[in-house]
Image: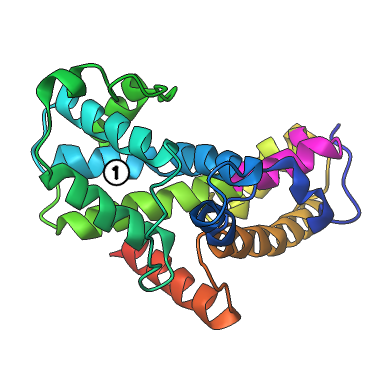
Amino acid sequence: MIESPSDPPQATQRGLFPVTRWTQVSRLRHDPESAEGRRALSDLCQAYWYPLYAFARRKGQAQVDAQDLTQGFFAKVLRGNFFAAAQETDGRMRTYLLTAFTRHMADEWDRAQAKKRGGGIEVLSLDFDDGERRFQEEPASEESLERIFDRAWARNVLERAGAQLEQECVAVGKGELFSAISPLITGDGDASAYDELSKRTGLTVENLRQNVRRLRLRFRDVLREVIADTLDDPTPAQIDAELQALRAVMVS
């Protein structure tokens, strides 16, 4: 039997996950050796590499060339001076990165340096095999490349929010419950599954519904937190706008 939590995980457990805010990353403009900024850069690379890789592949780059471009771009980011002249444009990290990556792709590359995947700069541990599998599983699309990037960004944000919520549940001993009801938390599950889940978990249907409602509310909060981390000035209005953009690209 799965024990039912009386309350949803609290925001105070958010320290389990690294925070990658514009303010932390842009701090490198003034302090290139900032440990906090360097950690933020590493987290940034892990969070955004796949949308940019998929963008390069959709743009017609061969698999190995897309890998080189992605590695080379983030090698440049990790040098520490990438944000030295950063103007945060519309305040969205995804917009700034896509603009910079597009410019990076258009640059004249030294092929010998590209083959070294960063020219001696530390190579990131990126799972390109998994990235290519994900790319191949994506449906063909006539959408603009920017729209495709935004869709990959939206999926990435949802995955990060889901992973954070899962870790919060695991931290309070509710990981098994989360695994059981997670499809219902994000709205992907069938409501008719409650009866089967009740048998599996030993919880009543009403108890399951209560837990799903609690975790849905927490998921919305976590999603807003993840989005806030990608904005230089995460006001409620800006977060709402990004949520609207996320919904738009996921339903279209």
Q: Residue at x 14, y 50 (%)?
A: 141
Give the magenta range. 162-175
- Residue 146 image offset from top left, x and y in percent: 21, 58
Between 187 and 159, the one nearer to me in the picture: 159
Location of residue 99 with respect to 248 vertically, above or below: above
Amino acid of disc 1:
Leu
Q: In the rendered view, does 22 fall on the left or right side of 16?
A: left
Q: Quadrant of residue 62?
A: top left
Q: In the rendered view, does 57 fall on the left or right side of 96?
A: left
- Residue 130 image offset from top left, x and y in percent: 36, 24
User: Is 164 one of the magenta-colored residues?
Assistant: yes
Q: In the rendered view, does 121 fall on the left or right side of 22?
A: left
Q: Residue at x 58, y 41 (%)?
A: 33
Location of residue 79 with respect to 185 vertically, above or below: above
- Secondary element type, mark 1: helix
Name the main secondary structure of what is drawn in magenta.
helix
- Residue 238 image offset from top left, x and y in percent: 50, 77
Q: Quadrant of the C terminus?
A: bottom left
